[in-house]
Image: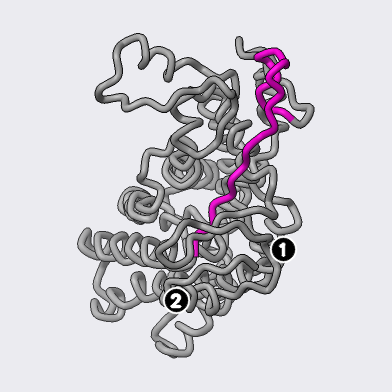
Amino acid sequence: MKIQNLVSPRHDHTSTPDNILGDGVRTDVRGQGRDPITILKLPMRGTVHVPTSRIWRAVVAEFIATAFFVFFVGGSVQTPAILRNGAPATSADFVITGFVQGLAILCLVASVAGISGGHINPAVTACLMVIRSMPVVTGIMYMLAQFVGGIVGAALFKACVASRGHELGATVPTSWINPFQTILIEFFITSMLLFVVLSTAVHSGVTASGIKPLAPIPIGFAVAIGVFLAGPLTGGSMNPARSFGPAVISNTWRYHYAFWVSPFLAAVVVGVLYKIIFLSAPITQQQAHTSGLEFEPSHVTLDMGTASPGERALASRPTGISEAEFINRSASNEDICRVPLGVGPGVMHSAGQGVTEESLNTSRLGGVGRAM
């Protein structure tokens, strides 16, 4: 179930245009106050917002999804090796491995995105913590669940293949790759993955581009591409939990620290740069209206296809609110959400007041909406 937070900031028609955020938050329409430090410090609760009552469910979802993923990682690596019966690996093996891991991520992210956000990767969680899109405590809980899930997934695969699964898909660099090269390769492919995650699963929700539900597809392909490129070199991890689980069960630790240093370093670098460069851009009047938030009483609703050039210019006028500020503002009232029930208009209710998924679905099917 997807619940969208709606906020209608209080408007003081006598206020100056630079007070368009309301609630004591002032942002100059000319862009003052959007310096890099201010942007980095700004919370972005609108991107990953798990209600308190659902945190434990989200943590369980991350555990289960990561366990499934590591299980399929082991299968994607060890099954071709078992079938080769000792013969050298071929390029087809890495194609199979990349596709299996990419498709597994695609399916699992799509499955648990509505519950936990579908991280399945401590590097993704860390990156969202860096951009202040996720509380630190919740992020730590996610990471613990992911690492434990990785161990459980590797153990389950070990139980299935018994003595034939020697390394269980553990990421081991090839003999001519040194530690620095391992860190560098993993840093670049993890950075690419995190950039795709931020641009499709986080940023696209701000611009109302309509592709956010499709985010698991490019994310899955990013994982597959990383494995295609780095599989023969480092194993193509991009995920500390994916490396840690098989390493624990198979006791394989060669250069293992590289698979922690690279992803978390990439999380910091990509998170900081993405927020400063891309999330500091001011949103427009049209973006604000399309997303359901009104920041100025003078905004107009336009059909951009039939509007005159002057009207399009008005709708395209920057509001002075950066996209990072906009994301945060969209979730500033986390207790109020709109839930469309039945065939009538949506009703407003206070979150956490005992409305279960089952009762919500029952109300939808019955065509009756009731304010809780």
Give the residues drawn in magenta, as a range.
1-22
Answer with left or right where residue 137 lies relative to residue 30.
right
Is 15 in the magenta?
Answer: yes
Answer with left or right where residue 200 lies relative to residue 9.
left
Instruction: Name the dominant secondary structure of the magenta segment.
Output: loop
> How far apart, in angstroms, are the residues tagged by discs 2 and 1?
30 Å
Q: Element under label 1?
A: helix
The reply to whether residue 225 is in sight is yes
Q: Element under label 2?
A: helix
Q: Amino acid at mark 2?
A: Phe
The residue at 70%/64% (across/down) is 141
Neighbours of disc 1 within 10 Å: few (<14), some (14-19), many (20+): few
State whether residue 145 is above or below residue 139: below
Q: Amino acid at mark 1?
A: Thr
| Pointer 1 residue | 52
| Pointer 2 residue | 71
The residue at 48%/89% (across/down) is 159
State whether residue 94 is above or below residue 361: above
Q: Position of residue 314 (x, y in %)?
A: 43, 14
Q: Residue furthest right?
A: 24
